[in-house]
C-alpha cells in the first residue's frame, strides 16, 4: 500500500484511499458495476468512492478488500487505518453550516496542498486578504445575511490563512489582475491596508505575488480565475479548481491540468517581477 505523507488532510486521504481501491479493482479485472453489487450499491457509488467525492464506510471498504483478494492482515489494517484517518473531521467542519459541499472539498485540498498557484481577476485571493477587506467582500456578496453569519464567514477565511503560516505549509504563488487591486473594496482605508498587507506578505519565503498589468492588454487567461493545487503524495494528481457562481469544477485529468498549467506559465512570464509588484502596489496606494 502507498505510504502516506505526514500532514495530509482528510480530503486528500480520502482521494488517496479511493485511488488505491480503484487500482485494486482494476488489478482484479472487475468493473465498477461488479464492485457496486458487492457492497449493495451502484456503479456511480463506486465511482464517487474512487474519486474521493464521498466518505467511505468501514463495512464497504472491508467488503471491497475481500472482493479484490486482499487477505494479508497487515495490508488490510493499513487500508483501514487510512480509512479512519480519512473520516476524521477537518477543522473546517465546525463551519459546515456556512460551507457548501463543493467548497468544503476545496478547503480540504487547500489544507493538504504543498503548492498552490492561483490567478485572480476580481478580488485579492482569499488567503491573502486582510480581515477588513474580507469583511467588505463577504458583505458585498451576501445581501440579507445576518451580521453574525458575516462575522463567522470572515473567521473562516482568516482561519484558512493559517495554512500559510505552518512550517510545512504550501508554497503559494498568486498572479493578480491589476483590476482586482484597483477595485475599491471597503473604501480607501481598507484598500490601502490591503495593498500594504500584500507587500508585507511578499517578505515570506513561501509567498510570491505577481500582477497582470493593464498595460499588457489581452492574455491567455481571459476565461477567468482558477487555481492549481499540487500535493506531496505522489499518488495524488494535481487538481485544477475553477469556481463558478453556485458550484465548482475539479479537474484532474492530465490534459486539463496541462492546459491550465501552460496558461499559468504564460501568465507568470508576462506579469510583473516581485520588485515590479512592489512598485505597482506603491503606485496604486499613492493614487487611492
Image (cartoon, rainbow, N blue to C red):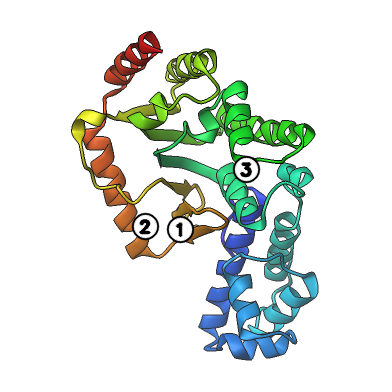
Q: Relative to residue 224, is residue 192 drawn left or right?
A: right
Quadrant in the picture for the N terminus: bottom right
Based on the displayed image, in which of its 4 quarters is residue 286 positioned? top left
x and y percent of residue 171 in the render? 46, 34
According to the image, label 1 marks what residue?
Answer: 237
Disc on res. 7: 3
**Frontmost residue, 246 versus 144:** 144
Q: Secondary structure at mark 3?
A: loop
Per the model, the C-alpha gap separating discs 3 and 2 is: 24 Å
Residue 229 appears in view? yes
Crowding at label 1, few (<14), some or many (≥20) Cα neighbours within 10 Å? some
Instruction: Judge depth for marks 3 and 2 and give the one in front.
Output: 2
Residue 235 appears in view? no
Instruction: Judge depth for marks 2 and 1 and give the one in front.
Output: 2
Q: Relative to residue 237, is residue 276 drawn left or right?
A: left
x and y percent of residue 276 in the render? 27, 19
Per the model, the C-alpha gap separating discs 3 and 1 is: 17 Å
x and y percent of residue 26 in the render? 52, 82
Which residue: 76% across, 50% down? 89
Based on the displayed image, in which of its 4 quarters is residue 129 positioned? top right
Mark toward the start of the polypeptide (3 vs 2): 3
Crowding at label 2, few (<14), some or many (≥20) Cα neighbours within 10 Å? some
Q: Secondary structure at mark 1?
A: loop
Tell which residue pokes out farthest to the front in this image.
Answer: 144
Q: Secondary structure at mark 2?
A: helix
Amino acid at each position: 500500500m502507498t505510504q502516506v505523507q505526514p500532514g495530509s488532510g482528510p480530503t486528500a486521504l480520502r482521494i488517496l484511499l479511493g485511488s488505491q481501491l480503484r487500482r485494486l479493482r482494476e488489478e482484479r479485472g472487475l468493473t465498477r458495476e461488479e464492485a457496486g453489487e458487492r457492497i449493495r450499491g451502484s456503479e456511480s457509488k463506486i465511482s464517487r468512492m474512487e474519486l474521493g467525492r464521498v466518505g467511505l464506510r468501514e463495512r464497504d471498504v472491508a467488503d471491497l478488500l475481500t472482493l479484490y483478494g486482499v487477505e494479508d492482515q497487515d495490508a488490510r489494517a493499513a487500508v483501514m487505518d487510512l480509512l479512519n484517518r480519512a473520516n476524521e473531521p477537518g477543522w473546517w467542519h465546525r463551519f459546515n453550516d456556512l460551507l457548501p459541499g463543493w467548497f468544503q472539498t476545496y478547503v480540504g485540498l487547500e489544507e493538504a496542498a504543498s503548492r498552490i498557484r492561483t490567478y485572480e481577476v476580481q478580488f485579492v485571493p482569499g488567503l491573502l486578504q486582510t480581515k477588513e477587506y474580507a469583511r467588505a467582500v463577504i458583505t458585498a456578496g451576501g445581501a440579507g445575511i445576518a451580521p453574525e453569519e458575516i462575522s463567522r464567514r470572515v473567521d473562516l477565511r482568516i482561519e484558512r490563512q493559517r495554512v500559510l503560516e505552518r512550517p510545512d505549509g504550501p508554497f503559494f504563488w498568486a498572479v493578480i489582475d491589476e483590476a482586482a487591486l484597483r477595485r475599491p473594496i471597503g473604501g480607501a482605508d481598507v484598500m490601502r491596508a490591503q495593498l500594504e498587507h500584500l507587500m508585507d506578505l511578499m517578505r515570506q519565503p513561501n509567498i510570491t505575488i505577481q500582477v497582470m498589468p493593464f498595460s499588457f492588454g489581452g492574455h491567455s487567461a481571459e476565461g477567468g480565475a482558477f487555481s492549481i493545487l499540487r500535493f506531496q503524495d505522489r499518488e495524488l494528481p494535481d487538481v485544477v479548481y475553477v469556481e463558478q457562481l453556485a458550484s465548482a469544477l475539479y479537474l484532474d485529468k492530465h490534459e486539463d491540468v496541462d492546459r491550465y498549467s501552460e496558461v499559468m506559465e504564460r501568465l507568470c512570464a508576462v506579469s510583473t517581477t516581485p520588485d515590479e509588484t512592489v512598485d505597482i502596489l506603491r503606485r496604486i496606494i499613492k493614487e487611492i
